[in-house]
Amino acid sequence: MAAKRRTAASPDPRTDCSREGLRKAVLDNLFYATGHAQENAARGDWYTAVAYTVRDRMLKAWVQGIERIAADGDVRCVAYLSAEFLIGPQLGANMLALGITEPMREALASLGQDLDAIVFHEPEPGLGNGGLGRLAACFMDSLATLGVPAIGYGIRYEFGMFRQAIEDGAQVELADKWLRRPFPWELPRGGQQYEVRLGGKTHMETAPDGTLRVQWTPAKTVTACAHDIPVVGHGGTHCNLLRLWRAEAVEAFDFSTFNAGEYFSSVHDKIFSETITKVLYPNDDPYQGKQLRLGQQYLFVSASLQDMLHIHHSLGKPLETFHTTFAIQLNDTHPAVAVAELMRLLVDVHGMDWDTAWSVTTQTFAYTNHTLLPEALEKWPLPLFAEVLPRHLEIVYEINRRFLESVTAAHPEDPDLARRLSLIDETSPRFVRMAHLATVGSKAVNGVAALHSELLKRDVLGDLAAFFPEKFTNVTNGVTPRRWLALCNPALAACISNRIGTRWQDHFEEEIIRLEEFADDPDFQAQWQAAKLTNKQRLTHLAKTILRVELDPAALFDVQVKRIHEYKRQHLNVLRVIALYNRLRRNPGMDFVPRAVIFGGKAAPAYYLAKQIILLVNRVAEVVNTDPAVAGRLRVAFVPNFNVRSGQVIYPAADLSQQISLAGKEASGTGNMKFGINGAVTIGTLDGANVEMRACVGEENFFLFGLTTDEVQAVQRAGYSPAAHLEGNPELAEALDQIRSGVFSRGDAGCFRPLVDNLLHRDEYLVLADFASYMDCQDRAARTYADPAAWTRMSILNVARLGMFSSDRSIREYCRNIWNVPVE
Ligand code: 475
């Protein structure tokens, strides 16, 4: 009664979302959470106060979300297992979901504070490398928005993706101390802790009931501690959980060694344990087998499965029905050891018979592959695997023995098939093939774009797909239109909402198509152009403050931001810039559409050629930007430390999106979609999701160039000769010659030799083969840009027709075709 009376008279100060309520709550949090009065609070203190204020307003849905998962055994819960969740800054996204951005903005303005500056202050948790980790975050957003109960399970790295600084043109890696200040969006869950064992030996033991059981005596045990981050859906009613594990020592001190005076070794165990979740491996591929990495994978997988079994058990359901409580998605093979771990938990720990356990396991898991590069497929050397996970290796062997028996029985005519399908690669020193383990242990396997899924079946996992044709399927990636349009592009979002209302935010595919009819409307075009200009000014300001590079907002903003990789061909883009530069120098009076060419992205620290590409971009920028002969008509900028936050400024400002990977190499791409829904037109190859994007927007609204997948394969079969492409193309020969001779390395002729030699003699990604076609296509793009009405029409139609690239659509497909989970 008392509570009711308070609701009527004065709203609860912790949930009140009115302007005045927010103002009071922010002040209250400023004082009680940061210990500062208004007068001497710094920007970081205001951030903390606002974050706590928003968090309070999420807690009810948050707690209800956990309760629903733990109480409703009838609805299958999705468990998304991923070594990476690149969630990005949280404050803006959470305010958007709750619908309190504007009252908060006003509340802060009344306190003399600027909301945008506070939002921009938030350090971002860099808990992922790139596409794969960001996809997991988009999927969590969509699951919550669609009201599907889900838990994302991952790792709470103390140091996330390195911070990239550019020193004298070169990449320098700095530690990412994102936890220097407490992260307001997580709750450490003391109650959710599990022991995870590593190393040691196994032996057989007779159980009390007389049966033989395997006993695993580990060399080490560590504790995995849960840290929960809420993922609130659009509208604020449904909240899911991101549960990240941190490794801790079981006992901080080994007291017997301590008492013996061995202070240092007594602390050793603590250090070893905490090292496991210390740092994210910054390689998106090729894959490197490191013992600590396997420890990371196993820690989060084991803790997550123990947690799920605990939840399942608390529902009072029998163990044989585990797969009706959880649908587990393996985000690439990084969590694939889960197949062996679930078998171990069911058979060794809970005493289930092997066949029942295998049936439960293969009904529980599904696996998503994210790569077409064969060298990026994860395989663990047997000796290393045996050292870290001796019991799991035995289980893998047993899975493999049974599997290969079925293979030989089904295909006696192909005696080599067992070797090709085996979970073990027998080449010395022998490896566990994680993609094979994931496929055999799952009921579904999917690629992330139509072309990728076809190529998986044909090439990368061809034998497995032929053996399990019913398992293989496609779910094309998508991105959340909340973060990647509504939040990052308020100017365009307002322009869209003025015409078609705001329902597009959570019904993107259905609603955004309604923009089509305004594509030629001069008023709408003018508003569209104004929004783009606002965004280009925002990026211009960023480039000026951090790079001291002057961009011209009237120029064509031509952007390539993504990880730096040879297959993504940033060097093709640079060669093009050099060719344009040479044209302008030769013919200063030529008709030339001014361009700002913007690059961004991190190179894996040990990836030498990728680092050369970064240096080359910066050296070319140095020459071009200071040459009065081009007089600002061509500018080059490399934006350092590309991450979610800078992406939110960069994607909305682009006119032209560079998606120029060699056909057959990019699994999907998701940056292509982020650019597209922000009104950039794509110049790209028929690779990854570009193929489907082009089909949606119409070929007349997409700048296509380059070899197709089949042509690439034909060229490579016939024996590719890069030199042949130099002869007929003096522009290309000149550009390469300039790089080689030191024009872009302050006269140092040796500087880019590795990169140039690679292009001239190997060129695995056919950069030279696609150069001419790329140049022609760029010229077409420039000519179209010179006609603003034609360009704007293309831009509007791109946004209108890219509705299917919302991650809401992807998640619906996973729910219906893979997880068998109800969804609206
Ligand atoms: C693809 N990351 C994109 C995106 O599906 C695709 C690998 C090993 C270790 C750590 N991270 C990785 C990836 O493999 C990755 O990000 N792959 C990307 O996944 C989402 O759109 O084409 O390259």
Image (spheres, helix red, strand yellow):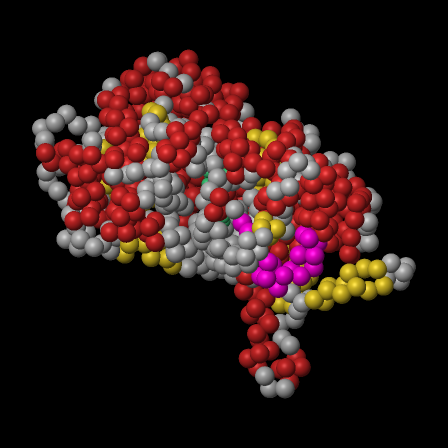
Along the line of sight, the residue nearer the viewer: 670 or 307 = 670
Q: Is residue 518 left or right of residue 271?
A: left
* Rendered-image quadrant of the N terminus: top right
Taken as a whole, is the magenta stretch helix, strand or loop? helix
Q: Residue 660 location in percent, x, y? A: 35, 34
* Residue in the picture at 27% in, 56% down: 167
Q: Residue 445 location in percent, x, y? A: 61, 36
Q: Is residue 383 magenta?
A: yes
Q: Is residue 798 left or right of residue 753?
A: right
Along the line of sight, the residue nearer the viewer: 280 or 472 = 472
Please identify the residue farthest to the bottom as the structure is shown.
Answer: 260
* Residue in the picture at 55% in, 33% down: 457
Residue 143 appears in the picture as rendered: no
Residue 636 appears in the picture as rendered: yes
Count the labels in the image. Answer: 0
* Residue in the picture at 20% in, 31% down: 728
Q: Quadrant of residue 523?
A: top left
* Residue in the picture at 35% in, 37% down: 719
Is residue 726 positioned above or below 528 on the image?
below
Along the line of sight, the residue nearer the viewer: 791 or 236 = 791
Q: Is residue 414 magenta?
A: no
Along the line of sight, the residue nearer the viewer: 175 or 430 = 430
Q: Is residue 607 left or right of residue 579?
A: right
Is residue 416 positioned above or below 217 on the image?
above
Q: Residue 319 location in percent, x, y? A: 80, 46
Q: Residue 208 location in percent, x, y? A: 89, 62
Magenta range is: 378-397
* Rendered-image quadrant of the C terminus: top right
